[in-house]
Amino acid sequence: MLKKGYKLYSILLGECPRCHEETMYENKNPYKLKTTIKLNENCSSCNLHYHLEPSFFTGSMYVSYPIGIAFTVPPFLISHVLCSASLLTTLFAITGTLIVFLPIIARLSRNAWINIFVSYDKDAVEKYTSTNQ
C-alpha cells in the first residue's frame, strides 16, 4: 500500500512528490516546533524546487480543514458516544487532540497540497543526473 509511486506514500511520509527519494523537510521530526514547516529548498535527488511559486503553501489551509476534521472525529466518538461525556468534556478532548496533532496536520496538509500539483516520475532522478554530467 505504501510503495513509491503512490501519492499516499509521499503524503504520509513527507517525501519528494516527484521522485519519492528524500524528505521535503529540514527536520523529519514534526514536533521540533521551530522547524515543523521548514522545507528544504530543492530535492537533492531530482532538483524539484518545493516552493513552486511565492506563497504556494497558503493553499494548504484548504486541505488542513478536512484533515483536522478527520482528526476530531475519533475523540468525539470516544468521549461523547462511547464514554457519554458532557459536551464540555468532549470539546476539551477535541481541542486537546487538535493541539497535540497540529504539527502533523500542518505537514500532512502541505504534503497533500504539493502532491495535487506535482506527479511522481520514476525517471526523475535519472533525468536530473544525466543532464548534470
Image (cartoon, rainbow, N blue to C red):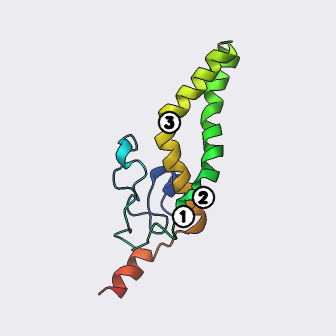
Tell me which corner region of the image, top left, top right, bottom left or bottom right, holds residue 119.
bottom right
The answer to whether residue 44 is seen in the rendering is: yes
The residue singled out by tag 2 in the image is 59
The answer to whether marks 2 and 3 mark residues whose Cβ atoms lie closer than 8 Å is: no
Q: Is residue 26 above or below residue 21?
A: above
- How far across and how far down the image is residue 62, in percent? 64, 52
Q: Type of residue at label 2? A: Gly
For the view shown, which residue lies furthest in the front direction? 54
Structural distance between the alpha carbons of marks 1 and 2: 6 Å
Q: Nearer the viewer, residue 53 or 16?
A: 53
Tell me which corner region of the image, top left, top right, bottom left or bottom right, holds residue 66.
top right
The answer to whether marks 1 and 3 mark residues whose Cβ atoms lie closer than 8 Å is: no
Count the numbered circles shown. Answer: 3
Element type at mark 3 = helix
The answer to whether marks 1 and 2 mark residues whose Cβ atoms lie closer than 8 Å is: yes
- How far across and how far down the image is residue 52, in percent? 51, 70
The residue singled out by tag 1 in the image is 56
Residue shown at 39% from the left, 56% from the top? 25
Label of residue 92 in the image? none
Judge depth for marks 2 and 3 and give the one in front: 2
The answer to whether residue 29 is seen in the rendering is: no
Label of residue 101 in the image? 3
- How far across and how far down the image is residue 125, in percent? 39, 75
